[in-house]
């Protein structure tokens, strides 16, 4: 979509959002090869490319998704009955061939890029997105899912996971991680193993009321669900949410997906990030998420879309626009950071991505802006106009 030039070139637009500092009206970004070499205020440089009435953002970061479920769009609409939805997801996965799963992953990757995502955290059932990411214009942490509640399943799950990790070496656009799926699906011993694996760790935690009831009293709808699967083993469950926080604390990077039912005073490890998936949260009719209380505590909050099994699309910008409408008291700068730099920090990639900072990768998302005067973040967030161009490592990789 565009040749990579060894010469420096410059781009401007109505607003440039570095994210690590305030927006620059008619700011100019200087790119050389794959890197940003300068971000200058208006008037210092003559731009080579003027994108007009648009915003230039860092490439967006989707800190939590499931690419292998990209074929489920609209097939299992979320309801308050979380276990019924889980059954539909499991049934879908069991029917997919390896070729169909790979097609689903490629579909999801193309959609992510089209919506301006240049870095993502993918929870991968069998690690299948690792190979698909080799030739795609974005970065990712592939968290291979770790599932096994009974001692027998846990005893085979960890060696298989460890072998998979050992065979995947980090590169310029891919890193391998592990995702002990959830306290209701993982033997408590596996949280300790994962935390000591020396790689990024992501855990679905405090996602549903059913999960909380199971951990607190060993009752609720997840009991018959696990019994039907033939894996009910109450002695293997984690004692509590706080116990999971404690057991996983040494992992870094460390992500807790959802956190819908976490207490605002939960003892979160200092290196942890909560990944909030706003539209999926709303689709399941959960009570209000405590993300504002966590932000007030200084806890890192990133944004994810979750999968197309629970969301209409993989548009991270749509997630923060949804939050902007729902919580107009949250500053737009905070929301944009959640979808960019905080996500890069969460995934361990902040040295390369997440902000328009000299020395970082030249990754942009370009978004048309409405023709009116307003505070720049409101111009961006009060609109429904999608990303129109994407730059990755100094090359235009998507143009609508």
Image (cartoon, helix red, strand yellow):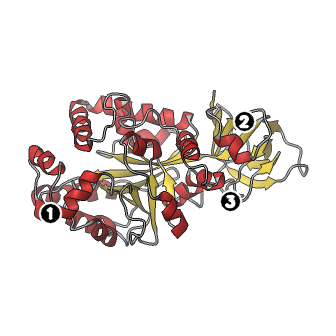
Q: Mark yes or no: residue 313 visible.
A: yes
**Residue 372: quadrant of the picture:** top right
- Asked if 215 appears above or below 69 in the picture, the reply is below
Q: Which residue is mark 2?
A: 369
Where's residue 389, x and y in %? 65, 34
- Mark 2 crowd level (few <14, some 14–19, many ≥20, 10 Å Cα): many
- Give the number of marks: 3
Q: Mark yes or no: residue 347 visible.
A: no
Q: Nearer the viewer, residue 67 or 216?
A: 216
* Residue at disc 1, secondary structure: helix
Q: Nearer the viewer, residue 298 or 308?
A: 298
Nearest to N terminus: mark 2 or mark 1: 1
Q: Nearer the viewer, residue 89 or 292?
A: 292
Q: Quadrant of the N terminus?
A: top right
Give the spatial CA distance, label 2 vs label 1.
Answer: 53 Å
* Residue at disc 3, secondary structure: loop
Q: Please tell me which residue is depicted at 39% across the width and 72% down the height of the picture.
A: 267
Tell me if label 2 and label 1 are in contact, CB under 8 Å.
no
Q: Nearer the viewer, mark 3 or mark 2?
A: 2
Q: Which residue is mark 3?
A: 20
Horizontal side of 383 relative to 314 (left or right) equals right
Q: Which residue is mark 1?
A: 236
Where's residue 332, x and y in %? 64, 51
Where's residue 228, x and y in %? 10, 43
Where's residue 187, x and y in %? 19, 61
């Amino acid at each position: 979509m565009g040749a990579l030039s060894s010469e420096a070139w410059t781009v401007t637009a109505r607003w440039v959002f570095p994210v690590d500092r305030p927006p620059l009206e008619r700011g100019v970004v200087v790119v050389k090869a794959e890197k940003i070499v300068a971000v200058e205020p208006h008037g210092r440089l003559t731009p080579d490319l003027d994108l007009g009435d648009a915003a230039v953002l860092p490439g967006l970061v989707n800190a939590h998704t499931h690419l292998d479920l990209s074929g489920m769009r609209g097939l299992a609409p979320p309801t308050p009955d979380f276990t019924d939805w889980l059954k539909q997801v499991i049934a879908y996965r069991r029917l997919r061939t390896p070729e169909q799963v790979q097609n689903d992953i490629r579909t999801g990757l193309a959609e992510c890029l089209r919506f301006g995502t240049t870095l993502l955290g993918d929870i991968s059932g069998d690690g299948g997105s690792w190979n698909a990411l080799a030739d795609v214009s974005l970065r990712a942490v592939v968290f291979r899912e770790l599932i096994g509640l009974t001692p027998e399943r846990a005893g085979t799950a960890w060696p298989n996971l460890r072998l998979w990790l050992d065979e995947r070496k980090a590169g310029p656009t891919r890193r391998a991680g592990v995702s002990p799926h959830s306290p209701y699906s993982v033997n408590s011993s596996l949280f300790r193993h994962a935390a000591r694996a020396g790689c990024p760790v992501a855990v679905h935690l405090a996602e549903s009321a059913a999960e909380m009831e199971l951990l607190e009293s060993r009752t609720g709808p997840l009991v018959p669900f696990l019994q039907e699967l033939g894996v009910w083993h109450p002695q293997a469950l984690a004692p509590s949410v706080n116990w999971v926080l404690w057991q996983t604390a040494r992992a870094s990077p460390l992500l807790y997906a959802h956190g819908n039912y976490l207490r605002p005073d939960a003892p979160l490890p200092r290196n942890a990030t909560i990944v909030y998936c706003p539209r999926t949260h709303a689709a399941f009719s959960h009570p209000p998420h405590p993300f504002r209380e966590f932000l007030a505590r200084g806890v890192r909050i990133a944004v994810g879309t979750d999968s197309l099994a629970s969301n209409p699309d993989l548009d991270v910008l749509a997630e923060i626009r949804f939050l902007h409408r729902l919580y107009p008291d949250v500053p737009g700068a905070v929301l944009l950071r959640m979808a960019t730099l905080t996500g890069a920090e969460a995934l361990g990639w902040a040295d390369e991505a997440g902000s328009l900072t000299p020395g970082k990768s030249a990754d942009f998302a370009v978004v048309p802006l409405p023709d009116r005067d307003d505070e720049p973040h409101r111009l961006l967030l009060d609109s429904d106009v999608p990303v129109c161009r994407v730059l990755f490592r100094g090359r235009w990789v998507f143009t609508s």
